[in-house]
Amino acid sequence: MTADFTMDGKQSLDADVTGPALAEQVTKNPAAASKVEPQGPDAAMIAAQNRVLASGGKLTPQEKWKREEHPLDAYNKLKDQVSRNEFPTAPDNFRWRYYGLFYVAQKQNAYMCRLRIPNGILDHWQMARLADIADRFGGGYSHVTSRANLQIREIEAKDAIATIEAIQDCGLCSRGAGADNIRNVTGSATAGIDPKELIDTRPYAREWHFKILNNRALYGLPRKFNVAFDGAGSIPTLEDTNDIGFQAVRVRGGSAVESGIWFRLTLGGITGHKDFARDTGVIVKPGDAASVAEAVVRVFIDHGDRSSRSRARLKYLIDAWGFDKFLEAIEDKLGAKLVRTPMDALDPQPAFDRLAHIGVHAQKQRGLCWIGVLLPLGKLTSAQMRGIARIAREMGDGDIRLTVWQNLLISGVPEAKTAEVEVAIEAIGLRTRATAIRAGLVTCTGSTGCRFAATDTKEHAEAIAAWTETRVIMDTPINIHITGCRNSCAQHYIGDIGLVGVRVALSDEGDTVEAYHLFAGGAFGPDACIGREIVKNVIPKDLPRVIEQLLRHYLANRENASETFAAFTRRADLALLQAAARIDMD
């Protein structure tokens, strides 16, 4: 930055035209309400809504619900529903996601509670307490998500408040973990312990995490928003799939700017819409990252689309404006110029290791290791949660590190104790070793716990792994991403093999069955690419054989052992890939 930040934080707390007063005006006369000058911490959101109405546009239902009653003003209403053991109507189901509560009818007729865990790292005692919460209020298990986070499921309506308050009692929270908010802040899973890393992302992820929690104005977005910090360590963080990606880079000496470690700023990632975050040409001092992120978010609050949910993401604002205009708007919010530098002033980023999230790896602290633990499709029983907490406490440094690969690491394990730790992990039903197929398997919740999902992704993922890993020996990493719907929570477009669930009609009478469209050739990082569709409407019982044949086709026809599956399928003839995916139907 070339000047001090002057972002205006002096927002009035006057509530005359927010909350109940605004709701009454909206109900009686929406056109008149749109002309009222908004004040208070929600002013930017309301002003953006007003501009839509003043131009003759229509707000989405979600924008109307926020305008009528802001979710963060409705806690007493949530408590009242809970006291009557009632689940919410659609508007309140949206609002309660601001507290991390998702009503997942018709699948489980229960709440799911999603946490916030900055950089995915929690203490052993927190994991043990969460196991107690899962037993007392949930189904006795949790899921690790693709944002290095935890979800607790099967929470009855009467226990919703007790759950989120118990989570707060153990030093964590669920605020803003869903709906139109900045989601869990991800960072390098090996932050602070990785011999390869350029920077420890933990302090920067935490600073951004607490800035979000303590600034009401940052809850006024038109749609969800993802931010990731990558320290250039061994385990990929997938920052290029986020709305904002901060990538650690080294600026060479002799450049026009100060040499040393900076963050490269990337913007607009949303791979479910077939786009990665793009380089802006801007580098950011690590200490300025949270302020730059806030400026980006504030521009998005002011100008993001509030009349179309499908276009209410940062990517579409950048597409409409172009980077030059968008970066100027960031500078206006900051009151300072951003620092631009050419790519040739930066050292190449260190290569990551696609299998470093599994097994034993040496830390930069001499004599210590991290151990990556494979979770069965991201699931942990409460007994396993307590077991992991005990192992981390007694044989590690006490930290438990969740990863975007839906598993966890135990860090600070003395080299002499690694074998003992592996035995202890196996004793609780988990593993530290895996085939390439299981190590790279990523799934969303699927139809057992999500009303949007068309398919039972976790069951089908297990069937794929069980079949293929006994029939195909992969000598190279392979990522299979399975998502139950087009929302692409499991990011199917970036997998070597990506599967998206659909319902396929059996007849004209409307009967449908589960099926998948299959994509191949996706990748992330330096080789980032959106996978291309290979075959449609593969039914679950055929999936394992289809994937087996694709993997065999790759192994038999690649140029050499160094050619990745993604590179092979990108250059391969589509008709040949489709032929390889074809099986004789029973």
Image: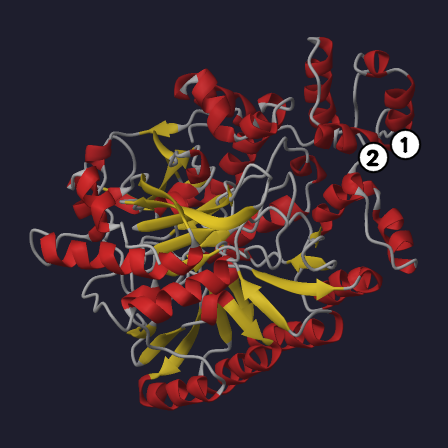
Q: Nearer the viewer, residue 74 or 369?
A: 74
Dividing the image into 4 quarters, which one contains the N terminus?
Answer: top left
Residue type highlighted by circle 1: Pro
Above/below status of 393 relative to 249:
below
Name the residue: 33% across, 77% down: 433
Observer able to see residue 445: yes
346 horizontally vs 61: left or right: left
As drawn, the residue found furthest toward the top would be: 55
The residue located at (27%, 50%) in the rendering is 582
What x and y, as percent, mark residue 125? Answer: 61, 77
Q: Position of residue 74 (x, y in %)?
A: 84, 44
Name the mark on residue 296: none
Which quadrant of the structure image shows residue 140? bottom right
Task: Give the position of the C terminus as an image quadrant.
Answer: bottom left
- Dot 2 amino acid type: Glu
Question: Disc 1 designates what residue?
Answer: 20
x, y percent for residue 128: 62, 78
Q: In the image, 81: left or right of 118?
A: right
Q: Do the numbered discs 2 and 1 sit on residues whose CB atoms are within 8 Å?
A: yes
Instruction: Give the Cα distance between marks 2 and 1.
Output: 7 Å
Categorize mark 1 by other alpha carbons within 10 Å: few (<14), some (14-19), many (20+).
some
Residue with the mark numbered 2: 69
Asked whether 505 or 396 is in front, the reply is: 505
Quadrant of the image occupied by residue 541:
bottom left
> Which element carries disc 1, helix, strand or loop?
helix
The spot of residue 415 in percent (x, y) is 31, 84
Relative height, residue 509 to residue 156 (above, below): above
